[in-house]
Amino acid sequence: MTVRRMILCMVLIIAIPLWAEAGFSRTEIELIANKLEGADIPSEFVYRTLADERLEKLDIVVSRNVFNQESQRDYESFTNGYSLHVARRFYKKWHSKLTQASQRFQVDPHVIVAILLVETAFGQFPGQFPVISVYASMVLAYEELRLEQQEIGIPPALSEQDAYFEKRLKTKATWALEELRSILLMGSLKNIDILNLRGSYAGAFGVPQFIPSSYLSWGYDGNHDGHVDLFQIPDAIYSVANYLSEHGWKGTELTRAENYEAVLGYNYSRIYADTVIQVAGKLKKKTL
């Protein structure tokens, strides 16, 4: 069995018309928990969280993370007249908060609006996947693949295609493990209900679609209520501004090299960055 076929069988479950299974088995919990050893998280909290029946095995999410590839068509709608109208309306409604965040972090307010438009249409489409389940499923998929390889004895010499898919799953699982640690820290240190937190298939959540490590590092309390809630617009605005500032944003010139790189830091996709800069530029012309 090729690596690609094995991964497909594991994550797509073609013969079963279910996109998720509730809960993890004891063996699966142990596989995941063992990867978290050494993290600054109480083991009791880790096991209790992973054993919660609200966790789901999101096989389709693993598939999308490993195999999906974006295209220009995914972003075309954000530059049309309607999207720009919605963006201008948002800019007008939240002008005061955008101005405050812009002055605080020295970030162009139009790019903040552009990012919030492209990410979730200002919170209309934040995603419905259980975030912690996304990361736990990614970690488990790779660990199970490794165990299956050991059992069936896949030869070390893989085809170029098989090597690519195995490498991509490993990369995604390594990244997911760090985000799993981060979301567990969100639960254990900040008392956030991480089991009910929902977001995209890539594990991003809230209006600005932060991943857990970004939340911990750059989430900002924009409405000064004592906690960071990325589903609240003021916190979303300030958090995006903080993120861009910390990733090198300079001045107000959208096409400046440092600013393009700051947007790439937000989402390492040139199609994404090009779209955000284009939307911000169009919006800026209409609001000056």
Image: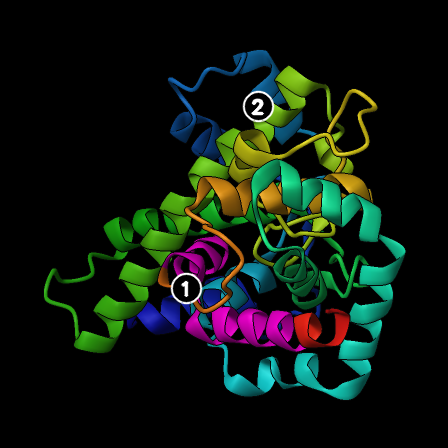
Front residue of 147 and 32: 32
Tell me if 85 is positioned left or right of 29 in this view.
Answer: right
Task: Report the residue that reaches farthest toward the front.
Answer: 288
Tell me if 155 is positioned left or right of 278 in this view.
Answer: left
Give the residue at mark 2: 185
Tell me if 170 is positioned left or right of 17 in this view.
Answer: left
Indicate the position of residue 17 as horizontal and vertical percent values: 70, 71
Looking at the rendered image, the quarter that the N terminus falls into is: bottom left
Give the residue at mark 1: 256
Indicate the position of residue 275 as horizontal and vertical percent values: 56, 75
Residue 236 visible, this orientation? no
Q: Is residue 127 depicted above or below 226 in this figure?
A: below
Looking at the rendered image, the quarter that the C terminus falls into is: bottom right
Instruction: Kindly check if marks 1 and 2 are in contact, taking CB atoms under 8 A apart as contact.
Output: no
Residue 283 visible, this orientation? yes
At horizontal 49% and vertical 75% (from top left) the residue drawn is 274
For label 2, the crowd category at 10 Å Cα-Cα, with few meaning under 14, some 14 to 19 and many 20 or more, is many
Q: Amino acid at mark 1?
A: Arg
How was the colour assigned to the protein in this rendering?
Answer: rainbow
Tell me if 59 is positioned left or right of 259 in this view.
Answer: right
Q: Is residue 42 depicted above or below 245 in this figure?
A: above
Mark 1 or mark 2: name the one nearer the start of the chain: 2
Q: Would you say the magenta stretch is mainly helix, strand or loop?
A: helix
At horizontal 52% and vertical 31% (from top left) the residue drawn is 217
| Range of residues picked out in magenta | 258-282
For label 1, the crowd category at 10 Å Cα-Cα, with few meaning under 14, some 14 to 19 and many 20 or more, is few
At numbered mark 1, what does the secondary structure look like: helix, strand or loop?
A: loop
Indicate the position of residue 179 as horizontal and vertical percent values: 50, 39
Front residue of 98 and 215: 98
